[in-house]
Amino acid sequence: MNSAEPVPAHVAIVMDGNGRWANRRFLPRVAGHKAGVSALRECVRACAVRGIQVLSVFAFSSENWNRPKDEVSGLLELLVLALSREVPQLVADGVLLRFVGERVSLADVVRDGLQRAEAATAMGRRLRLNVCFNYGGRWDIVQAAQQLAADGVEITEESLGAQMLMGQVADPDLIIRTGSEQRISNFLLWQAAYSELYFCDTLWPDFDEHALDRALLDYRRRERRFGKTSAQVLAAMDNQRAA
Ligand code: FPP
């Protein structure tokens, strides 16, 4: 992709297909998640090179606890291992890492790992990486509403949006889901109101920079109207060019 072409400021990804990737190779599902970490590493780099400012990924949903015990523990171990291995490179690459999700119920070793990784990358200015972990979109809306109610603050679109865990980050422009399924699965429900959705058949471990570029190209062809008509959008663009 030509680096002069505009890119979405915020890309969010449902990284689906790790299990099928492993099944096809007669490997345990955790091997698919391990390969998924490598794909994520490459994707972070590719996003930074392309000037994307925020990348949000769905790593573990509130519902994923219902998976087989060995897969859940494998994912948690992978997270702790990935944090210790990946953080130095993230720091070197100017990545700010933030975890988005419920932390209170996590084991101490996991919660401490998240906190340490966030602290180590706090100075990153090139790309913000939001890893949604133990996260659910409905949960986030409810916790934000509960907080406002407890503080006696009126619930409006603005106050609720600001209270959500990603309240200080602009909504995703583009949401990608790999692995052939076409659903949101409780990811960024509030923030996805005007996001462009892109679905592809590539299984997450196979998602490389070329697959990312295909998604970005598709995004460039979309007309984002935010409830307006096409004529209004084109007129606003003409005005912007003339200014
Ligand atoms: C969905 O694929 C993927 C997940 C539930 C986990 C995503 C995690 C990673 C990509 C690795 C990064 C993880 C950490 C811990 C940082 P699936 O298992 O539902 O695949 P399937 O639909 O083919 O079964």
Image (cartoon, rainbow, N blue to C red):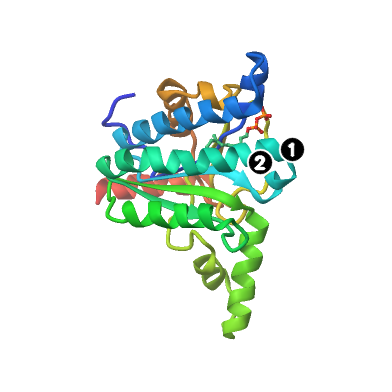
Q: Is residue 42 left or right of residue 152?
A: left
Which residue does the numbered mark 2 point to in the structure image?
A: 72
Is the C-beta separation of discs 1 and 2 under 8 Å? yes
Q: Quadrant of the N terminus?
A: top left
**Residue 14 position (above or below residue 171):** above
**Residue 40 position (above or below residue 94):** above
Which residue does the numbered mark 1 point to in the structure image?
A: 68
Residue type at numbered disc 2: Val
**Residue 195 position (above or below residue 219):** below
Location of ligand 1 given as a quarter of the image: top right
Front-lying residue, 31 or 45:
31
Mark pair 1, 2: CA separation: 6 Å
Front-lying residue, 109 or 185:
109
Percent x, y of residue 192 = 57, 50
Residue type at numbered disc 1: Pro
Percent x, y of residue 152 = 59, 86
User: What residue lies at 29% left-to-right and 45% top-to-bottom?
Assistant: 91
Q: Secondary structure at mark 2?
A: helix
